[in-house]
Image (spheres, rainbow, N blue to C red):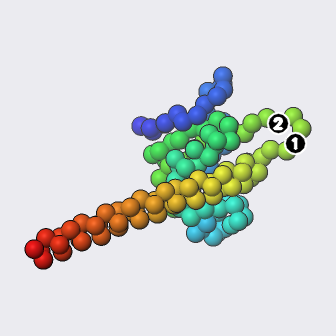
């Protein structure tokens, strides 16, 4: 049984079987083209997750659905995929690869924010640990 998590659907037609699929390897900076990366490395991020991809789609107003229990055929250890519906734009070309470049650019900002918040949390934890160590040393001296 496939578990489908609806993240962002803004559409009357909910037949997701016709939507395009994006696996995390398509946007993974650590993968080579032979290993499944689909776009230029300048638009990729290291180890994207399906939740980050869906968040980027939500910010770009692209309807998407996460399918958590699906695996990438080339690398079956990578779980999850995102189904997206390519929006219809009257004046302009929109295809899957153009959307993946937009999603990759948005992922770079998302990853930067996540990494920045993680480093702040790590700094706060090390400061607290140093304070505890100082308190322990003071107690030992007395």
Q: Position of residue 9 (x, y in %)?
A: 60, 31
Looking at this rendering, what residue extends furthest in the top direction?
12
Q: Residue furthest left?
A: 142
Q: Which mark is residue 92?
A: 1
Give the total of numbered labels.
2
Left or right: 61 in relation to 24: right
User: Residue at the location (24% across, 71% down)?
Assistant: 134
Task: Please tell me which residue is depicted at 72% across the width and 51% down the height of the picture.
Answer: 102
Q: Is residue 30 left or right of residue 103?
A: left
Relative to 131, does residue 22 appear above or below in the rendering? Answer: above
Position of 70 compared to 45: left or right? left
Dot 2 alpha-carbon crowd within 10 angstroms: few under 14, some 14 to 19, many 20 or more: few
Q: Which residue sits furthest bottom? A: 141
Position in image of residue 19 (x %, y %): 66, 38
- Badges 2 and 1: C-beta atoms under 8 Å apart? yes
Residue in front for this viewpoint, 20 or 102? 102
Please name the residue shown 56% across and 38% down the image.
Answer: 65
- Residue marked by disc 2: 89
**Res 48 visible:** no
Q: Is residue 6 visible?
A: yes
Question: Label 2, label 1: how many angstroms apart (C-alpha)?
Answer: 6 Å
Q: Badge 1 local density, few (<14 within 10 Å), some, or many (20+)?
A: few
Q: Determine the secondary structure under disc 2.
A: loop
Q: Nearer the viewer, residue 74 or 41?
A: 41
- What kind of element bears circle 1? loop
Q: Quadrant of the N terminus?
A: top left
Label disc, if present, on residue 47 of the rendered structure: none
Furthest toward the right, the residue is 91
């Amino acid at each position: 049984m496939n578990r489908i998590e609806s993240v962002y659907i803004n559409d009357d037609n909910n037949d997701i079987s016709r939507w395009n699929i994006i696996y995390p390897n398509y946007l993974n900076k650590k993968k080579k083209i032979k290993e499944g990366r689909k776009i230029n490395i300048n638009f990729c991020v290291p180890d994207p997750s399906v939740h980050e991809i869906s968040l980027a789609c939500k910010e770009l107003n692209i309807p998407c659905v996460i399918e958590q229990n699906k695996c990438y055929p080339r690398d079956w250890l990578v779980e999850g995929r995102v189904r997206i519906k390519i929006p219809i734009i009257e004046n302009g070309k929109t295809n899957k690869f153009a959307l993946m470049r937009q999603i990759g650019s948005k992922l770079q900002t998302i990853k930067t924010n996540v990494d920045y918040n993680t480093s702040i949390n790590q700094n706060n934890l090390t400061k607290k640990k140093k304070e505890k160590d100082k308190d322990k040393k003071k107690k030992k001296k007395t």
